[in-house]
């Protein structure tokens, strides 16, 4: 498999986050719930991540269940998983991985998940959060004012065992 192009890390000032309430309330009115993952839902969420994203991301979110409170938020409608956002999985102070099912994109789900995780990091005492190896930079800029960390490529997501970089968000 060829090397993938490097993706920079982003920095977010958690003291300047938009409020969480409106994003969650908007989805709630449409029957979408944003909540922390529960340990008894771990298999279902892992299978969603593997099917829609990658086994690597599923491995990464397993760390979220070892932390209390669980460092993963999930969006659901009924019994259907729409997306997830994890933090404090690969490194302290890092957001990720995060993903939304294609059918639920551009409907506010990613915004609510991102804000849920970022606000949780602020509650932990962080002033800044890092989003590692970002793909959709513009989404993070627009939603939480993220800025690129100069010189952050290749970042922590190099895969030493395979000698190549892992594809990220």
Image (cartoon, helix red, strand yellow):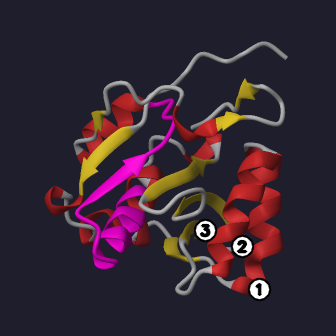
Above or below, 65 against 74 in this view is below
Residue 49 or residue 155, whichever sits in front:
155
Q: What SS does tag 3 mark?
A: strand
Query: Would you name the residue on which mark 3 appears?
Result: 77
**Cα gap from disc 2 to disc 1, whole angstroms:** 14 Å
Identify the disc placed on residue 40: 1
Where is residue 30? Give x, y as percent.
Answer: 45, 66
Position of residue 86 in the picture relative to residue 95 (left or right): right
Where is residue 103? Give x, y as percent.
Answer: 63, 43
Where is residue 94? Give x, y as percent.
Answer: 46, 55
Name which residue lies at 66% across and 83% down: 38
Quarter-wise, where is residue 106 in the image? top left
Query: Would you name the residue on which mark 2 appears?
Result: 79
Q: Earlier in the sequence, mark 2 or mark 1?
A: 1
**Range of magenta residues:** 114-136
**Image quadrant in which the N terminus is located:** top right
Where is residue 82? Give x, y as percent.
Answer: 62, 57
**Cα gap from disc 1 to disc 3, whole angstroms:** 17 Å
Q: Earlier in the sequence, mark 1 or mark 3?
A: 1
**Image quadrant in which the C terminus is located:** top right
Would you say the residues marked 3 and 2 are in contact, meaning their CB atoms lie under 8 Å apart?
A: no
Would you say the residues marked 1 and 3 are in contact, meaning their CB atoms lie under 8 Å apart?
A: no
Name which residue lies at 72% across and 84% down: 39
* Circle 1 Cα neighbour tier, 10 Å, few/some/many (<14 / 14–19 / ≥20): few
Q: What SS does tag 1 mark?
A: helix
Identify the disc placed on residue 29: none
Quarter-wise, where is residue 158 in the image? top right
In this view, the residue farthest toward the left is 16
Position of residue 22 in the picture relative to residue 114 (left or right): left
* Circle 3 Cα neighbour tier, 10 Å, few/some/many (<14 / 14–19 / ≥20): some
**Nearest to viewer (mark 1 / mark 3):** 1
């Amino acid at each position: 498999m060829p090397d993938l192009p490097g993706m920079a890390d982003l920095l977010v000032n958690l003291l300047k986050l938009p409020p969480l309430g409106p994003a969650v309330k908007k989805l709630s009115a449409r029957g979408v719930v944003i909540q922390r993952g529960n340990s008894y839902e771990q298999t279902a969420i892992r299978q969603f991540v593997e099917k829609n994203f990658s086994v690597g991301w599923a491995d990464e979110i397993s760390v979220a269940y070892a932390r209390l409170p669980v460092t993963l938020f999930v969006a659901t409608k009924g019994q259907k998983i729409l997306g997830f956002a994890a933090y404090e999985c690969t490194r302290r102070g890092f957001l990720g991985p995060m993903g939304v099912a294609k059918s639920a994109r551009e409907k506010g789900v990613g915004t609510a998940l991102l804000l849920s995780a970022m606000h949780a990091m602020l509650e932990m005492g962080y002033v800044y959060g890092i989003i590692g190896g970002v793909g959709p930079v513009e989404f993070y800029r627009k939603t939480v004012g993220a800025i690129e960390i100069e010189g952050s490529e290749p970042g922590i997501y190099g895969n030493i065992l395979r000698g190549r970089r892992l594809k990220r968000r």
